[in-house]
Amino acid sequence: MSDQYSALRSNVSLLGQILGQTIEQALGAPALEKVEAIRQLAKSSRSGDEQARGQLLDELHRLSDDELLLVVRAFNQFLNLANVAEQYHTVSRHADTGFCQLDPLKQTLKRLKQSNISSEQIAQTLAKLDINLVLTAHPTEVTRRTLINKHVQLSDCLDRLELDNLLPTERTQLLARMRQLIAQAWHTDEIRHSRPTPLDEAKWGFAVIENSLWQAVPEYVRELDTLLQQELTMGLAPSARPVRFTSWMGGDRDGNPYVTAEVTQSVLEHGRWMALDLYIRDINQLISELSMHQASEELLALSGQTHEPYRQVLKTLRSDLQLTHKYLEAKITGQPSRGENRITDIKQISNVLQLCHRSLSANNMAVIADGLLQDTLVRCRCFGLQLSQLDIRQDSDKHAQVLGEISQYLELGDYCAWDEQTKLAFLAKELANPRPLLPRHWQPSEQTQEVLDTFRVIADNHADNFGIYIISMARQASDVLAVKLLLKEAGCAFNMPVAPLFETLDDLNRAPQVMRTLYDNEVYRAVMGEQQYVMIGYSDSAKDAGMMAAGWAQYSAMESLVTLSDDYGLELVLFHGRGGTVGRGGAPAAQALRSQPPGSLKNGLRVTEQGEMIRFKYGLASVAKQSLHLYVGAVLEGNLMPPPQPEPQWREAMAVISDVSCEHYRDIVRGNKDFVPYFRSATPEQELGKLPLGSRPSKRNPDGGVESLRAIPWIFAWSQNRLMLPAWLGAYQGLAAAIEQFGEQHLAHMSQQWPFFRTRLEMLEMVFCKADSWLSAYYDQRLVAPELQPLGEQLRGELAKATALIKELSPEHTLLGHQPWIRESIALRNPYTDPLNVLQVELLKRVRAGGSVALDNALMITMAGIAAGMRNTG
């Protein structure tokens, strides 16, 4: 690593030394010597020393079962500590300017100031700034929460160690605390022994808000307002809510039988209970601080006294909060009812706080009003009374099955067997009909009853508790009308937005026609609401067609949907279902947003934050602020300085790349008879079920094959053996075909001028830095039957060709030459990840021959460790 990363290198070394001391204290010097010898061999092997590579393999093969567990635990923890140091380095005082995410926002604001964009345009864009981050429970976070908490404390220690005026005793105390935390982590099981429930996942999401975002969001809003004032002489409106949070945890029932109506109701109650707890803490501090007596007539009248009136009104509010908190706690824990359900709307809190703010400001105490009081008001706007609103997601077939059961009971025929026009006519008629559709004494099947119970939970709760209703695998306009009808039948008094999720390649291509049908339907237009949400599926489309074809289909669909909605005079909000990996649409946030079609961000940004990416981007308050500023800068730039419309020849080239890459991808994944057995032997796909990642099963259909495997375990399995196949398969064939037809210079021009295309290439560069042909070949050599090994050789040959072509197309003719930090970050972790890959092969060999509980545990730790090394696994 270059000198600019010396502080990072120093922190990695420090944490590694303490871990080494911990291992030596726990298991003796020989254990540490073995681990250190393997680390040094792995480092030499990674640098190209073939002799060291052979010695590394010999050393690892000779390990006993007990020694295997020791080594995999050591390298897993090395990687976790390296990630702690790396995450902290992004906000460190010693980080170079390339790490500072406030700097790109400043640069964006400076460019806006220097542009011909009018102040009115900028002000209008700021007024509509709406970043909605959706935290999902997708199972890619492999690190236990108890270990995450220790890692956060280690980061705090690293931060304090950087202070220039530390006393020697303070430094000694900090190092002692770090040794305690690392020892605690070493003596803690790395792997959960049971799967988390949906409620556990929701609590994890609430914990991220409590421990990081609750502090980060008000600071982010304050910093953003200051930057806007400094650079553009305009600030945020007093009522601005530039960021808000939604969750799928406890609401996403697509293929998850454990998310029931009862669970959803419980998650809503837990969210309000946790929010009240946090607001009570804020109010307690405000009561302590607001001791002044000057007040407005309005506040004096409410308080009923002139002595410390702020404390009086806040104590009354606190009493209502505490009574409601007790009421919810009794309900959640199943205890006898106590307290009262007094606080049911966030305005009951914010109205009191706004009154205090107005009074302080009117009495020349704005400096006080704009402190903690203003921070709590920001929290009210951004977190509401639930901390995060809850989205509901369900598969379209489930709704059709409910309507099929109803229609057959009423002897109207089978809804599921009707054609699309018949369905639309029936749904429009029933939506407009004031009488109920559900028969009074009808007893539905258990599955249908569960779907109906979910709609009743929605109807029985406040509108502010919910985000939107998402229909996965949406294919027709009737899928959307069906949900609107079921909401009506449940007696839902508010207009819940309904979003079709277009996931496969065919669905994305058909999306504009589906939405046109809806927009032309008068009954739907009457119940649509103020905005139309459409969710774009990145993961299943990539699994269906490959990354290049999926990316172009997503872009084309969004572009057409924006134009279509504009033609109808409707507000469209695109919801991006991105994952952390390239195979699921992942890319650095700002880079991904700048590659969107022009106009696609004008009504706000709604995007999923999934699995381990939630921790990496929002686990520390300082890092969370950076992530939020990064989003703001990219959204402002996307709206006010949008990318160019693609030229006709660019579209032609992308169509060729898409068609050829998709054909080759499907020929391999679907058409090659050896592919499925190769996949299952060359990766730990079959063993992934032992890793208790999340509450949701890894397959939609437990009896299905690869086609029923969810996109996340599909990606996870290929990242484990370092082939990274879903992220690049077909890319070489598509790009080579485009070069043959249009010439390399044409693609170079596309890369220079079109952020969408440049982002595709940069995503491939990152993938190829993480892929490793030698390790993939080693998996084949030890685990794959000889008759299947030629397929692996073919795929590695394609990987080599694709890597060479991407290097040729890169301006620097190297991988990630323009993003050296990412390249250095990968290089930092490789010497720790490589031994885990080799050990995983050894463990898979032993487990498949007849393993044991100890071997299973060691295998799961290798999965967790490699996931930490790859950083984004799903």
Image: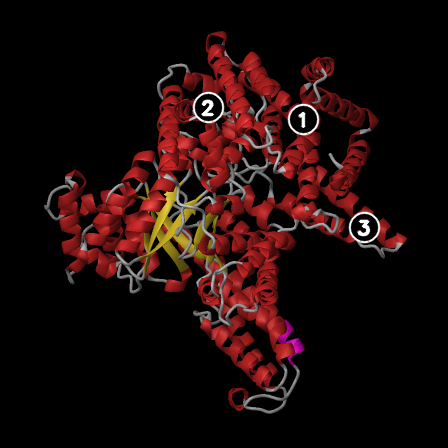
Q: Which residue is mark 3?
A: 174
Name the one closer to the observer, 309 or 578.
578
**Mark 1, residue position:** 69
Q: Does 146 sit left or right of 202 as displayed?
A: right
Image coordinates of residue 534 in percent, x first then y, are 34, 49
Residue in view at x 50 percent, y 73 percent: 349
Check residue 732 in the rendering and tell me which mark sits there, or answer none: 2
Q: Position of residue 637 (x, y in %)?
A: 50, 53
The residue under the point 35% across, 33% down is: 652
Give the residue at the far right of this rendering. Answer: 168
Q: Residue at x 60, y 52 (%)?
A: 104
Asked which secondary structure carries label 3, the reply is helix
Pick whichever of labels 1 and 3 is earlier in the sequence.
1
Q: Is residue 375 magenta?
A: no
Q: Alpha-carbon neighbours of circle 3 within 10 Å: few (<14), some, or many (≥20)? A: some
| Secondary structure state at the residue bearing disc 2 | helix
Mark before the other along the chain sequence, 2 or 1? 1
Residue 810 in the figure: left or right of residue 524: right
Q: How many marks?
A: 3
Residue 222 as seen in the image, left or right of residue 81: left
Magenta segment: does it hold 289?
yes
The amino acid pointed to by label 2 is: Tyr
Q: Main secondary structure of the magenta part?
A: helix
- Asked whether the beta carbons under mark 2 and mark 3 sit within 8 Å of each other, the answer is no
Q: Which mark is residue 305?
A: none
